[in-house]
Structures are given as C-alpha cells and as structure tokens.
C-alpha cells in the first residue's frame, strides 16, 4: 500500500521500514530453511533482529559503497569491484544469515568456499535470485497504473522471500561440505526403557557367546523388568532357560509367552515359539492348559502343521480333564486323524465321545464339517 501512497517524508519512512523488515525477514528465512525448518518465521522474530538489520546494512554498504569511493582513483577497479560485489552478493547474504557474523560475511575466503562448494549451481542460483527479486520491480516501475504498481510491489516482496527460501535450500543441501551442519550423533537418543532393552540384548549376546548363560539370563531378566512385552527379550529368556535346563521356569515362561502372543493376535509368532520349544524339549506337551493347547493346535492346523497340531491335542482329556471346550478340541483332533492318516476308526471314536459328553459342541459348525468329511471318507472306503 505504501508504494502507491502520495510521496512525502512519512511515505518514504514507511517504505524504508517495510523494505528493511523484508530484508531481515529474508535473512531469517534463509537461516531457518538452511536448518531444514520450513515453518514460516513469525513477525516477532523479525522485530527482535535489530542487530541483524544493522549487519545487513553494513554488508551492503561495504560491498557497494567502497567501490564507488574508489571510482576517483580507478574507474576500472571500481567497476570490477562492483561486478564482484554483485556476483558474491547472494553468497555474502547466505553467510550472514546462517552465521550472524559480519566479519564472516565479508571474508572473501568464505565467498570462495561457498561458490566452489556449490559449483555451477551457484550461477543458476545467482541468476534466479537476481531475476525473481528484480523483475517484478522493473515491471511495476514501467507502469503508470496504480493497481499494477501495487501488484508489482507485492509480488516483488513475495519473490524476495522465495529467493531467500531458494538460498536456504541450497545451504541445507550443502551443509555438510560447508561445515554448517551439526555433528551427527554416533547413536540415536533412546528413552530410558529402550536403553535398558538395548543394553540387555547386547550384554546377553556377549555373555552367551562366552558361554556365561546364567549372566546372560540375569541381564535379560532385568531387561524384561523394563519391557515385559518385548518380543526379542522373551525369545532370549526362553532359549537361555532351555540351555540352563531350568525345566519349571522354562515351562512357565513358555506358557506366558504363548498366551501373550495369542492375546496380541500373533498366531504366527506363537507357532514359531512352539516349534522352537519342541526342538529344545522334544515331545513336550502342556499339562492343565486346555485352552492354550486348543489355540495352539488351531494355529498349527491353519498353517498346515498337522502332525504338530495332533501332538498338542492327543490325550488332552487326561492332561486337562476339566477343560470345558474339550469337545471342540477333539473334533479338531478327529479331523486331523482323517486328513493326516485317513484313520476313520480313531476319528469315529472321538466324534462319538464328543456326541456323548459334549452334545452342544457336537452341533457346532466345526463338528458338522468334520462329520461330513467322515461320512465322505467312510462312503469312499
């Protein structure tokens, strides 16, 4: 709006204030984008950067006023210095924005470092910065229409900020080579519990490699105190208990671990845990764990592990006599006998047992399907 106000001291001061504010805002944009922060700075940030404004004015005065002072001595030298100032202006502005140091911004070695590091792209950046900052102003200055003057000035301000974002993006891309990036941390920052878990896993691995299984178990137990649901720690504890031949703790942990997996819907993990447990203690079956046995057998059956599923369910009525879903378990076992061995005799006995002792479960969909399979096989035989 100030660009189309009538001329005068007040208008001139307002235009100067807005121009200087835009310059400082541009420097803040360069610094923020160079840090990979694309959130627009607030106006209050600009208002608090009075020192940066003074340095910006001093930078421009040094780059362009000094060559003019030398014009009386040597016009060629003055023109050469003005051309150099125009060429290095984006580099000097970028250095000032990120360093907040006028001395660094006026250091020719810093200019050279930036230009060499950026390479040919610096010329493209220079052209783009000059174009987007100067072109709108040139367009609006050639017009007598107030609307065009207003739009030209507004667009010039906008493109100045765009050019600043371009310069910040260039610095962000080359931050490592220019020494502007903070040193990368050697490891990522961890929360306390995550650190305890990582330490437990690492220490347990070292102890196990050395054959110190008891020490490894101790650190794994401490890790599980911080993260009782952690998958890998539970795996490690199960393996270490097996290696140490602690049968009762091994069985108790296996039950808890499997229940944890089924509660979280991880049937596939439960199957893998059970198969590994079978390698540690071949022939092992649960005692008084009817529900867990049925869930495990169903998961094994769904994954085509028929032999393992059958092993889990055999003689379940003896191991878990009070299991209320024993009928459902034996319907599944009957189906396993039929599908794996074609053993109709055992399947028939199981179905008859379910019909006698669990009539409600005998009417389930699973039971109906098992009886249909039994009838088809019997007819085919």
Image (spheres, helix red, strand yellow):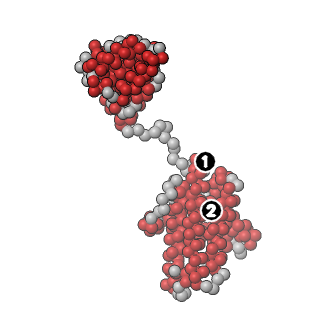
Compare marks 1 and 2 and give the one earlier in the sequence: 2
On screen, 360 above or below 145?
A: above
Asked which quadrant contains residue 232, the reply is: top left
Decide which of 183, 167 is in the foreground and name it: 167
Residue 326 position within the rendered picture, expressed as x and y whole percent measured from the top left: 29, 21
Please report the residue visible at 61 percent of the width from the left and 85 percent of the height from the top.
145
How many labels were placed on the picture? 2
Binning the other alpha carbons within 10 Å of mark 1 as few (below 14), some (14 to 19) or many (20 upward) gives: few
| Residue bearing the label numbered 2 | 90
Task: Work out whether residue 335 can be spotted.
Answer: yes
On screen, 233 above or below 285?
A: below
| Residue bearing the label numbered 1 | 177
On screen, 227 above or below 124?
A: above
Decide which of 155, 17 is in the foreground and name it: 155
Secondary structure under tag 2 reads: helix
Secondary structure under tag 1 reads: helix
Decide which of 172, 71 is in the foreground and name it: 172
Task: Work out whether residue 54 can be spotted.
Answer: no
Q: Is residue 370 left or right of residue 108?
A: left
Residue 144 position within the rendered picture, expressed as x and y whole percent measured from the top left: 63, 85
């Amino acid at each position: 709006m100030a660009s189309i106000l009538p001329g005068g001291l007040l208008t001139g001061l307002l235009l100067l204030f807005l121009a200087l504010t835009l310059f400082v805002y541009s420097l803040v944009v360069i610094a923020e984008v160079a840090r990979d922060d694309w959130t627009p700075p607030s106006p209050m940030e600009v208002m608090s950067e009075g020192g940066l404004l003074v340095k910006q004015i001093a930078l421009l005065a040094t780059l362009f006023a000094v060559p003019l002072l030398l014009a009386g001595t040597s016009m060629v030298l003055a023109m050469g210095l003005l051309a150099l100032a125009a060429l290095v202006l984006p580099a000097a502005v970028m250095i000032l924005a990120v360093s907040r140091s006028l001395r660094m911004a006026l250091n020719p070695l810093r200019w050279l470092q930036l230009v060499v590091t950026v390479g040919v792209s610096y010329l493209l950046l220079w052209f783009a910065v000059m174009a987007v900052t100067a072109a709108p102003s040139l367009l609006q200055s050639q017009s007598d229409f107030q609307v065009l003057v207003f739009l030209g000035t507004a667009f010039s301000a906008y493109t100045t900020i765009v050019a600043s974002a371009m310069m910040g993006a260039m610095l962000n891309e080359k931050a490592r080579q220019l020494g502007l990036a903070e040193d990368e941390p050697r490891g990522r920052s961890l929360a306390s519990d995550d650190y305890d878990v990582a330490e437990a896993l690492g220490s347990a691995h070292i102890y196990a490699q050395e054959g110190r299984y008891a020490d490894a178990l101790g650190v794994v137990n401490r890790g599980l105190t911080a993260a009782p649901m952690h998958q890998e720690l539970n795996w490690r504890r199960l393996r270490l208990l097996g290696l140490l031949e602690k049968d009762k703790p091994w069985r108790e942990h296996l039950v808890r671990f499997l229940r944890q997996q089924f509660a979280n819907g991880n049937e596939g993990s439960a199957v893998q845990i059970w198969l590994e447990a079978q390698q540690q203690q071949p022939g092992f079956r649960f005692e008084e764990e009817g529900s867990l046995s049925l869930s495990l057998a169903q998961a094994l059956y769904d994954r085509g592990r028929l032999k393992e599923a059958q092993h889990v369910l055999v003689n379940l009525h003896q191991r878990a006599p009070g299991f209320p879903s024993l009928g459902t378990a034996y319907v599944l076992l009957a189906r396993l006998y039929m599908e794996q061995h074609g053993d109709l005799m055992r399947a028939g006995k199981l179905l008859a047992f379910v019909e006698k002792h669990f009539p409600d479960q005998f009417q389930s969909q699973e039971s109906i399907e098992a009886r249909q399979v039994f009838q088809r096989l019997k007819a085919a035989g």
